Image (tube, helix red, strand yellow):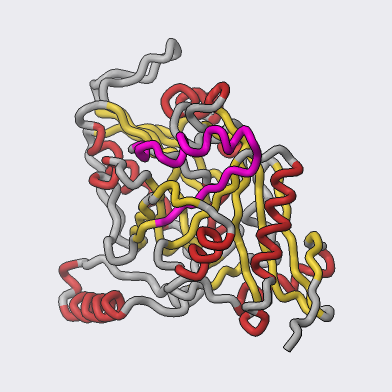
Amino acid sequence: MAFKKFIIRSYEGHSDRAKVEDLERRCKVGPSESVLYTMGDPICRIRNSPMYIMLVAEMENELVGVIQGLIKMVTVHSHPNNMAKVGYVLGLRVSPHSRRKGIGSSLVRRLEEWFTSNGVEYAYMATEKENHASTNLFMEKFCYTKFRTPTILINPVNHHQFQISPDIEIAMVKVEEAESLYRRFMGSTEFFPSDIENILRNKLNLGTWVASFRGDGDFGLDGKVPNNWAMVSVWNCGEIFKLKLGKAPLSCMLFTKSWSLIGRMLPCMKLRTLPNFFSPFGFFFMYGVYQEGPFSGKLVRALCEFVHNMACGSAQCKIVVTEIGGRDDLIHHIPHWKLLSCQDLWCIKALNSEGSNKFGELSNTQPPRTLFVDPREV
């Protein structure tokens, strides 16, 4: 039987908004069957990027597929000036009743064409490691290569605030100071965005905080930093979209019920509770986490507890999330629940001759310990 014809075109906000949101609700993503609620703005995840596009697939006046892409300059070692133009693929959705008709492949192909026409050297995508449908499409059909395996760390928010040690001082820094610190200490980190100042000035960025031990030195105007210090910035993802899980692993369900029962039976223990992930919820994303000094791990943990206490004041914020390099020692200092956390998979593909010449060196290098995850791509 012949497939019905479809067309690929650019997203038109006025006429497509409701249709794209309906498609998002009908497409459950990954093993957890998560659903994204964009609250009236389907391009909210890419709107804050330097250059972006959304493409839709239409069949007989029905919107049956969508994909999003963005372009930016990031740090990529072995390139001239250690910078490269990259395109990020995200938000690929195809209506359940229109799958296996080449719609997803056509959307990816057209997006790659847009990348190429704008001088992109590499296209990359990120997905849950267990999302086999996505990895099969990109790796087998479009020849993307496994690139990095960052770790997503998730910590539930509850109403019990942490008491931060009086020996630790936490201070919010101005945007200009934050930009200077990031460029100085993380500018050489893989995938560090060249427009970090735009991220820090964005309304979704709640701020940047530094932590140090009292009496261990100060942050001076001459660039001096304490012997031990740490830094983090916070992005309010819940301001633009909400998530809802369709299902959870059986082990997680059993643990949640048991934990909740113990908490009700022994309230004096003040056990931390798991939020309801089966109704729409928001979250804070911690990014640009940095530490320096032999005892700075305690400062990272203090900053994470500080962010948790911030999240307690938000009714919609149910979790605090961060993503770090797969070999990053930060994992030992960032509070998280292993049951909720998971491994991500980044895949990459060279799109032009410049990228192809460097691709082997880039894809075969030992993964760095640190990785900068842009909050605009969460």
Where in the figure is residue 156, as x and y percent of width and height?
35, 62
- Image quadrant assignment for residue 354: top right
Q: Which quadrant of the figure contains the N terminus?
A: bottom right
- Magenta span of residues: 344-368
Q: Please, is residue 16 above or below residue 257 in the view?
A: above
Rendered location of residue 232, percent (x, y): 41, 39
In the image, what residue occupies the spot 68% across and 77% down?
101
Name which quarter of the figure residue 132 lies in: bottom left
Say if residue 233 shows up in the picture: no
Q: Can the viewer see residue 124?
A: yes
- Residue 298 lies left or right of residue 125; in this view the side is left
Measured as percent of width and height from the top left, residue 325 is found at 37, 44
**In percent of the image, x 53 and y 26: which residue is there?**
82
Q: Is residue 206 magenta?
A: no
From this view, report whether residue 209 is shown above or below residue 155. Answer: above
Residue 149 horizontal/vertical position (percent): 39, 51
